[in-house]
Every structure is written in C-alpha cells, then in structure tokens.
Image (cartoon, rainbow, N blue to C red):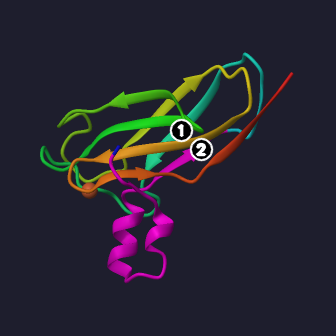
Amino acid sequence: MPKLFTKDMFKGCSETVEVYADKHTPIIKCETCVKRNEKVKVNVRVGNHFTHPNTPEHYFTYIQLWSLEKLIAEVHFFPGTFGDKPMKSEIDFYIVPKVSMHLTAHAYCTKHGLWKSNEIYVKVID
Ligand SMILES: [Fe+2]
C-alpha cells in the first residue's frame, strides 16, 4: 500500500504546504448515531477550503470508505468525470450498517498519492 498522507502531517508548515494538504484531504460528513439496518448517507468531499486541479494528468482517481481495516465502499473516477475545472471531488455513499463503525475515507491523487481523512465514529443503535 502506498504511503498515507494526512492533513495533520503538514500542520505548522508554510501556508503553501497547508493549502496543498487541504486540497488533498478527504472529509467525511454523516450522522454519528444511526439505526441498525437502515440506509445511511455518508458524504465524502476532498478539500475543505481549496479546490484541486482536475486535468487529464492530475485528478482524484478514487475515493474509498473504510471502517477500521475493512474497505466498505469505493468509487473510481476517470479523466473528465467532473469536467476539467479545478474542484472538490465529492461522492455520496449509501450504506446499511449492522454494527458501529470507525469511518475513514481515502482519496488517491494521480500526482500526489494517497490521502486519509480524520476518523468518524458512527454509533449504531436498535
Ligand atoms: Fe494533487
């Protein structure tokens, strides 16, 4: 597996490097307490404040959703999927959890490697 980068690895660096980290870091948005066996939307967006290039040579080729060490969903993109303007790649996953989850998202940039989100704990209740 390639090296995993996180935004925290670049804290305290120059503003240029912090912008670089921001636009590569996936962010998970979802409810943190959900019902067992009911569909849940998990939104993953890459970049908080800044957009990432979106050219045929430089784009995010996949976004994955993990719970601890288990891959639970992934989506692949191709050059042009989102046009050609700088953007924040984004996807909504719909999953049906049976147990509580420790979610992280991974996003792979074709030039700058694999980036990981913060972990989100999602409690599943009956
Ligand atoms: Fe990149």
In the image, is 18 to the left or to the right of 76? right
**Disc on res. 29:** 2
Residue position for label 1: 43
Mark 1 sits near ligand 1, with its Cβ under 8 Å away: no
Comes first in the chain, label 2 or label 1: 2
Can you name the residue that lies furthest to the top here? 37
Mark 2 sits near ligand 1, with its Cβ under 8 Å away: no
Q: Bounds of the magenta span?
A: 2-30
Asked if marks 2 and 1 touch (Cβ < 8 Å), the reply is yes
Mark 1 residue type? Asn
Q: Is residue 87 above or below residue 123?
A: below
Calculate the distance from the C-alpha at mark 2 to the C-alpha at mark 1.
5 Å
- The one of 83 and 12 positioned closer to us in this rendering: 12
Residue 21 in magenta stretch: yes
Helix, strand or loop status at disc 2: strand
In the image, is 109 to the left or to the right of 79? right
Look at 56% across and 45% down and name the residue there: 28
Q: Is residue 21 above or below residue 72?
A: below
Helix, strand or loop status at disc 1: strand
